[in-house]
Image (cartoon, rainbow, N blue to C red):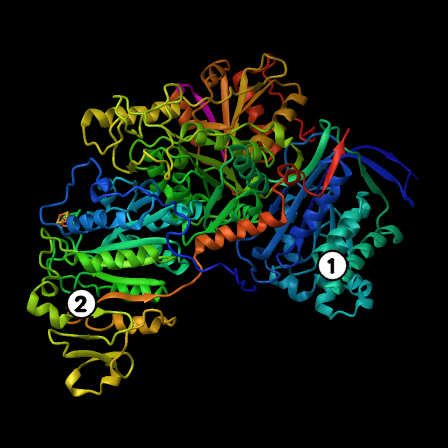
Amino acid sequence: MTAIDLGLPKIGGLDGVPTTDETYKAKDFKSDQEVRWCPGCGDYIVLNTMQAFLPSLGVKRENIVFVSGIGCSSRFPYYMNTYGFHSIHGRAPAIATGLAVARPDLSVFVITGDGDALSIGGNHLIHALRRNVNVKILLFNNRIYGLTKGQYSPTSEEGKITKSTPMGSLDHPFNPISLALGAEATFVARALDSDKKGLSEVLTAATQHRGSAFVEIYQNCPIFNDGAFDVLKDKDESARRIVPLRPGEPITFGSENEYAVVRGEFGFDIAKVADIDASSIVTHDPTIQDPSYAFALSRIGGQDLSHTPVGIFRQVSRTTYDDAARAQIESARKTQEPDLQALLTGNDTWTVA
Amino acid sequence: MSTSETTPEQTAGDRTRPVEKLDRVVIRFAGDSGDGMQLTGDRFTSETAAFGNDLATLPNFPAEIRAPQGTIPGVSSFQVHFADYDILTPGDRPDVLVVMNPAALKANIGDLPHGGTIIANTDEFTKRNLAKVGYETNPLDDGSLEPYQVHKVAMSTLTRGAVEQVGLGKKDAERAKNMFALGLLSWMYHRPTEGTEKFLRTKFARKPDIAEANILAFRAGWNYGETTEAFSVTYDVAPAKLPPGQYRQITGNTALAYGIVAAGQRSGLPVVLGSYPITPASDILHELSKHKAFDVTTIQAEDEIAGIGAALGASYGGALGVTSTSGPGVALKSETIGLAVMTELPLIVIDVQRGGPSTGLPTKTEQADLLQALYGRNGESPVPVVAPRSPGDCFDMALEAARIALTYRTPVILLSDGAIANGSEPWLIPDADKLPDLRVQFASEPNAMDGSNEFWPYVRDTETLAREWAVPGTAGLEHRIGGLEKADNRGNISYDPDNHDRMVRLRQAKIDGIKVPDVEVDDPTGDARVLALGWGSSFGPIGAACRRVRSSGMKIAQAHLQYLNPLPANLGTVLESYDVVIVPEMNLGQLATVLRARYLVDIRSYTKVAGLPFKAAELAEVFTDVINDSEPSADGSDAHVLTEAVE
Ligand code: SF4
């Protein structure tokens, strides 16, 4: 087997999607359906942010599609006045793959949750990411099963007491960012539901990215897992926990920028700026091809949110599966006429008189 | 072997040997799975097709890629039946058995009728190989094969000698022995040889010395027959009188793939196949992956579920979504088939059935997925089901599946099986321009029934009950669909009890109302009292059995179902017109169960689940018993079926 350089031009995530002169407003993206999430659910903020953000893309509304699986967040498409497909549990990335392959003129979003994407649909998620299909996968991580009323999820902390785990859960959780990077996703980012600005920035970059974009959104579920991310929202606490990732800038954080990310023995460590040479601070570069860099960043802190990098971990260019599939069709058409009669006839025939 | 006449000293070409005329012959090539028996059989089949005989083939190979060499589980065989008239099956039992080693003899001798011919490669009948399969003495020498005509040929040695000039190692040289066998059989049956030589040169274009060795071995086999006195007669099976036209040979899987390509061309839609490799369906994926120029995209997905998911996603986007699999894969795809039922999107699900349950018998055939196809989903989830009855019919039924899927916006399950997937037959090449027109109309305008300027995704065509297909990218028709119950017409989520009841009935009514052709009954005298009814790949054996029964003076009618859901409108009347309806199936009576429930008729079920197609003789006996039971003759004696009858 030989690898073939398909010689594809480097293009943006929305290239091929028809643009519009119409100036949409957020309300143009609101459907007539009553939103039915619980009061205070983080999903509301993400929905509002999305509706406010989409007009900035300048693409035709009818060419935007939201595909979802099953779970609270997967109701999202019903509330968007675009095309939408609320599918079955865990399978949205597979359905979106077929859609993206068939239709280069669409901007395809996958809306999923921690149970949908990481448990029942884990396989489809990693394969969509490794193929680099041009879809934007937004994972609403609330670290709990909401729709089924409060069982622990693959991102719940170990020992979590829930309806299905009265003595505490036994499973070690996934770090979704690390998982996506392990699948060599070409675009990986994290945002908080409460941070409209940061979320919009990440969504903009994700949409412009050609290929799979994976965005983990920490989302509060006030009913079954309230306050899971409170430490990241508390003014005092958040400063020393949130590690903002700004391309081209040294990675520092804290209310006075007194902490920094430095190279450690295998990965990255946290150090006090005062204790180290400024040159040892890591300068963020999401375009580094080797996923180990972004992976090391994803390992800073942990499930306890002691340190939580937020922003774009990785943004690299690689041929997308759907572009490559279409390129093969194109090149086949250049060398072969689609002659159905010739196909049916083949080379080995005989005639009965 | 049915013999008609022997013409001594008749010359064929440069041969001076008696030529015996036969109307049909069944040859089985058997050897180790490394011996290239499938290729040998394929080539003999091609030569036979080129010669103009009607034919049918039955490959039979182990599930293991390479079972231990020389053992019974490692035996691979290929049976070809050819005749001077139209035949229906690959033949029950071989007339000629070619065995490349003791395991092949042991595994197949039970099928060879007394008087049959064995051609054995003596070189492989070594002490060690005999011991491997439990022969204490060499059956070629100990008299145990007395009832047969045995030809002992040192094929490996002769092949080695023939290809010596090429300078290959011993192993590589001997590998060409299958071509020696092919050459010998080609000589015996007067097969044309140019095709095989051309084939070998193309196949081994990059390895000219291998090509040369194979051709030399092939010719050596031919010359061995021609020059030695070992074979005293050759055989002539005249070309068959088939309907006029241009023919080619085709397997079921290839015909299915071509049907899908044709459906894409005739509908004007791109085809997206989402599939995961599985025996015996993988060849459909392989074949379709070659036809990208026809705007066919194949996605080898991460699993069965992703395969159908990608296909459904493509259908949602306005393509013809297709997924191909076998029974275990259908089990995994069930939830997505349900989603396609709920979202009312076109989708073709190809199930090439194999022995089950679970992993079952991957390389063997069975018809036991019928109830799975009809009912194997949660909720009331009606899905049209069609089933081709022969390799060539796979092409037509693929087009039918596409017609139903596109017209009625529904997933359609096509049930093929291992026997027709790998079996081949001559195929009257269709005229591409005369294939059905499958063009579809996407929705382009708002359709709200209240006059508002909205698009309601579940407004139905009054005749077909199909909903409109509005593809993303259509301005003004933005809408949301999904697996939750939909409000009638508007398509919003609805938990309303009456609405659910109505929607369940509407989905059922849509499938029940699909137009399918009436089932045709073959009842030559018009007064048979017994009807043999089948579906799928058993068409051949049932038809052949009916011929046998009729040729012994009894009456039987035959009908075959290609549409399992909905069933043909005239089926109820047909069933009522006969005293006895006998339904042979390669399962435990699944169609019989459906028919009894649906028509309240007393179906006689005959079942066998051995992983192999029915034999015509076996069914003929069953039918004869049924006929005798239903109308005992005046003198009380039972009629008997001819065992050596036309087939
Ligand atoms: S259960 Fe939790 S995640 Fe689900 S809608 Fe309610 S608050 Fe939101």
Q: Chain of mark 2?
A: A
Residue A139, compared with residue A285, is above or below; it is above
Left of B474 or right of it: where is B364?
right
Asked if the magenta segment contains residue B601, the reply would be yes
Query: Where residue B317 sits in the image (x, y, percent)?
Result: 40, 40
Residue at which label 2 appears = A303
Q: Amino acid at mark 2?
A: Gln
The quarter in which the C terminus of chain B is drawn is: top right
Mark identifier at residue B177: 1
- Residue drawn at point x = 65 percent, y = 66 percent: B128
Cα gap from disc 2 to disc 1, whole angstroms: 65 Å
Q: Residue B543 falls in which quadrant of the image? A: top right
The quarter in which the N terminus of chain B is drawn is: top right
- Give, as a single range, the part of the protein colored magenta: B599-608
Query: Where residue B191 sits in the image (x, y, percent)?
Result: 79, 43
Callout 1: SS: helix
Q: Amino acid at mark 1?
A: Lys
Residue A182, compared with residue A13, is above or below; it is below
Query: Where residue A330 sits in the image (x, y, percent)?
Result: 54, 49
Query: Where residue A255 sits in the image (x, y, percent)?
Result: 11, 73
- Give the label, 2 or 1, closer to the camera: 2
Relative to the observer, which residue lies in front, A185 or B145? A185
Residue A136, compared with residue A290, is above or below; it is above
Q: Chain of mark 1?
A: B
Left of B402 or right of it: where is A278?
left
Left of B48 or right of it: where is B33?
left
**Neighbour class for label 1 at 10 Å: few (<14), some, many (≥20)?**
many
Q: Residue B508 falls in which quadrant of the image? A: top left
**Neighbour class for label 2 at 10 Å: few (<14), some, many (≥20)?**
some
Relative to the observer, which residue lies in front, A346 or A193? A193
